[in-house]
Amino acid sequence: MDEKIDALRALPPGSLARRALYAFLVGLGVTLTGYGSMFVKDTPAIPYKLIPDLRGALFLLSGTTLGLYAAYGRSSHRTWALWGVLAFVIGFHLEEATVHWIGPFPGSITGIRVGLLGTAGSLLAIAAVVLLHVEVESSRLAQDLDKRGAGRDSGLAVAEGLRGEGARRVVAVAAGAAGLGLLAIVSEKIIGNGATGGVYVLFLGSAILFGLAFALVRFGRR
Amino acid sequence: MARPKERTEDDAKGLAPFGRALATAGAAMLTLGLAFGDYPYLIIAVMLLGLCYWARGHAVPGLSATRTLSRREVRAGDTVDVSVEVRNEGAQPVGLSLHDKAPDAFSLEAGGNFGAGWLAPGQRATLRYRLRPPRRGTHPVGALRATAYDPLFLQSAPVSEAAPADDVTVHPRTPPAPRIRTSAAWGRTLLPGGDKASRGILTNDFRELRPYARGDPLKSVNWKATARESREDLRLIVNDYEVEGKKVVWLFVDASPYTVGGTNLGSVFDEIASGALAVAGHYLDMGHRVGFTLFGAGQTRILYAEGGDAQERRMAALLATAMPGEPGEDVQRAVEAAKGFLAREKPLVFVFTLPGRDPGLAKALLSARALASTGRRPAPVVCVTPILPGDGSTAARIVAIEEKAQLKGLERRGITVIRYHPQRAPLQALLAKGVLR
């Protein structure tokens, strides 16, 4: 127990608060994903209103637990948390994925409010897990550099710089993905929805994004 | 504590475990998205794979680095100040750790050879530290290794060599030679050839430059050297010449591969080199000329017999750059190479080696004695050898028996043998045993 308390005390300033925030964001993302699902929208609370509807609290609690699990320890914690979040994402979007194969819900929901909420929540949850990864690894790097003789201030400066740059990149990629979703919504009206092949507009959008990323990485380095 | 795995510049395939998980998840979401024709799956796949793609673009930054050493040639025990400056020449800020590798044997006296920094484009970082070399040899300081960390921590950190290593040559420190003043003391010392060779008719053999002393003839003043040395006050410098009839001592120093053994703070060869310098210093102080042969590692190297401090420095430089461990010529070849000098100068011969390793040692020493002897009177030949601490193993006992047998054989043939324990009593202390200081 003393070792764990010492480990907490050794964390860089503000790290604990940031980890708590990101863990909450994982929970929030999972909750939004859940409420963005047709399953939740069109089914009553279990067991049929005999007890209050606690589904939202359960989503938030389970998502935050995943986030807290990812907020410490080795990278395997973040890996398992990532797969946990993906399990929510795959599960809650499954009805949309299979909507054309099994009834009773017709058509795509991507463009409607519920679909937007679910997709945005999924992006938020995954981005929060990656941000947690950046936060934990940057803290460990700062401690490692300090122990190897670089000094606490130098280690913290490197960690702070990397954390800022890492967060910027995560937000940029998430924004790019969200922009791709908007492209899909806009183009759905022109070239059709997922049921009529409109989904393949994402290939065009992805190609544009990857081309942009390639140009940035390749030519924007110096 | 685990830290991001380091990879070299060439090793570009290094996603960290979480990065691999992210890539796998992205691939899974892409497959699901394509299979079901589902927007959210595909959008999430784009995000996951986009992060991995950005991380894979992480590369060694453009860095320029310079290392400045206060001195490149030092004596063992002196300090060297090292300053390393690194500049970020790229257009992106970069998080770096810098490690300027110091030789294992050197001790870090001040500062640190490891540092870290977040460098904006054009910004500089500096490492400053002080090293103390404890042993002779040519040692590389550096190379400077720069580790650049991925801001997403999805990619292992590439390590680049920002500045190559610089060599520092460490000259062995000459142990203080015993001052033997009385004839009674000379009777007790182990060193032969006791008379001081500072008197006699001056020859034309130049010895060294030295400050003017009262009584020096005016014609011996070296005016060019005087002009160089005289900054504000006149400081006369004179040419010093060898005196006629001066005695000559010849040292053979063994650097064969069997002298490599030891720790990173000192090897058998270091002990041998230290002993040779102690004896050389003693005879040079007495005004003798000292010749020198280094054999056993690479090509046999010879210094002609000369006197003065310059000769001592030349010997120290030769010993500093010796690389024991390289294949070289044995003692017989070394005597053969110096036979002209031995026959002409008739010197007192010292051989610094480890006995029991080279079966031709006795033959070589007898050959040297024959060359250095005048008439029927055999010249003194001294074999000096450090006693190594044994580990009690059977192999060590066998080596000790072979050493003892060879040394007994040498003594039977009239070779003087001096053995000493470097840890208990250094050679210079043993030579001065019972001698008034």
Image (cartoon, coloured by chain):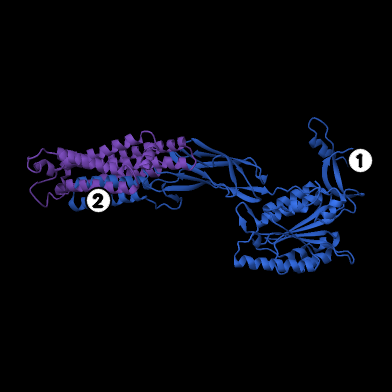
Chain colours: A purple, B blue
User: Which disc, if any, is residue B326?
Assistant: none
Q: Is residue B304 visible?
A: no
Q: Are marks 2 and 1 on the same chain?
A: yes
Q: Alpha carbon of mark 2 to alpha carbon of mark 1: how far?
A: 98 Å
Q: x, y (%) of residue B294?
A: 72, 58
- Amino acid type shown at disc 1: Pro
Residue shown at 85%/45% (left/top)? B240
| Count of all numbered marks drawn on residues in the image | 2
Residue B302 figure quarter:
bottom right
Q: x, y (%) of residue B332?
A: 74, 66
Find disc 2 in the rendering and name its residue: B30
Residue shown at 11%/52% (left/top)? A101
Find disc 1 in the rendering and name its residue: B217
- Return the residue found at the far front: B434
Classify mark 2: residues with Cα within 10 Å, few (<14), some (14-19) or many (20+).
many
- For discs 2 and 1, the disc positioned in front in the rendered view: 1
Classify mark 1: residues with Cα within 10 Å, few (<14), some (14-19) or many (20+).
few
Classify residue B66 as left or right of residue A166: right
Name the chain letter of the residue that bears numbered label 2. Answer: B
Secondary structure of the residue carrying numbered label 2: helix
